[in-house]
Image: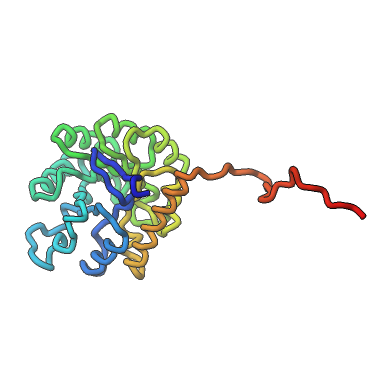
Amino acid sequence: MTTDALVIAGRAFASRLIVGTGKYPSHAVMQAAHVAAGVEMVTVAVRRVDLAAKGEASLLSWIDRSKIFLLPNTAGCYTADDAVRTARLGREAGLSNWVKLEVIGDERTLFPDNEALIAATRELVKEGFVVLPYTNDDPVACRKLEDAGAAAVMPLGAPIGSGLGIQNPNNLSIIIEHSRVPVIVDAGVGTASDAAIAMELGADGVLMNTAIAGATDPAMMASAMKHSVQAGRLAFLAGRIGRRRYASASSPVDGLIAPKTA
C-alpha cells in the first residue's frame, strides 16, 4: 500500500481520503479529526473563510500546510461566472491554483448544474487551474468534464450532507470503468461502510465532510473512515469473488476419500 498512491495532475497522495473543514464544533476538533484521518488534502470553502483573520481565529492556522494540501472549493456558487471568480479569489489569496469546482443548480437538493459546471471547467483549465469538479453520478457529464480538461471527476454518492450512502453503485461503476482521470466519490457518505463500498467499486478516493464533522466523536469517526478507505482499496485490489445464487462449499467434496466400510 505504501506505493499505491493517489495521483492527481502529477501530484501523489498516500492517503485516498479527503475531508472538509466546515461544520466542526471548533477548530481544535477539526484539527484532531484531520490528524486521526491521516489526510494529506482538505477542502476549504473560499467564500466561507475569513482570509483576513489572524492567529487562532483563522481556520488556516489550524491546518499544518507542511503536511496537508489545501483544496479551495467554490461552495455557495450558483453560476459559472460566480464559480470562476471565486476560484480566482482563492488563487490570489495564496490558497492554491487547484479548485474543487462546485456550481449548484438547485438550492434544496444542492445538485450540480452540470451545464454551467462544464463551462466553468473549460474556462478555469484555460487559466491554468487544476480543476476537480463536483458533479452528479452521470457518466455522460463525467465524460464531458474530462473532455473539458478536469484533472479528476467527483461524482456524488448521494445528496450533500444526507448521509444516505452510495445510492447508485451501477452508475459509479460505469463512471469508474470508463474514466481516464481519477474518480473521487464526493458527498453522501454517512458512515465507514459507505466509504468502503465506494472504494470497493474502484473509486480512486473518497471526499467527505459532514459524516466526520457531524459525528458524536469526529476524531473517532475520522479514524474509522481512514481504515474503511484503506480496507475498501485493498479489497478492490485483491479482487472479490463472483456472486452466486446458490451455496458453494468452503470445503469442496470433489476428491474426498470415501470412508471405509466394516
Q: Residue furthest right?
A: 262
Whether residue 207 is visible here, answered yes or no, is no
Whether residue 158 is visible here, answered yes or no, is yes
* Residue drawn at the location 28% of the way across and 56% of the way down: 39
Residue 151, position as x, y percentages in the image: 26, 37
**Total number of numbered discs in the rendering:** 0
Q: Hey, which quadrant is residue 124 in on the image?
A: top left
* Residue drawn at the location 12% of the way across and 67% of the way down: 57
Q: How is the model colour-coded? A: rainbow
Residue 51, position as x, y percentages in the image: 10, 57
When the figure is inspected, residue 135 is found, relative to residue 55, above or below; the finding is: above
Q: Nearer the viewer, residue 107 or 28?
A: 28
Position of the C terminus, as image quadrant, is bottom right
Residue 13, position as x, y percentages in the image: 28, 47
* Residue drawn at the location 32% of the way across and 36% of the way down: 181
Residue 261, position as x, y percentages in the image: 90, 53
* Residue drawn at the location 38% of the way across and 38% of the way down: 138
When the figure is inspected, residue 179 is found, relative to residue 78, above or below; the finding is: above
Side of 148 relative to 199 (left or right): left
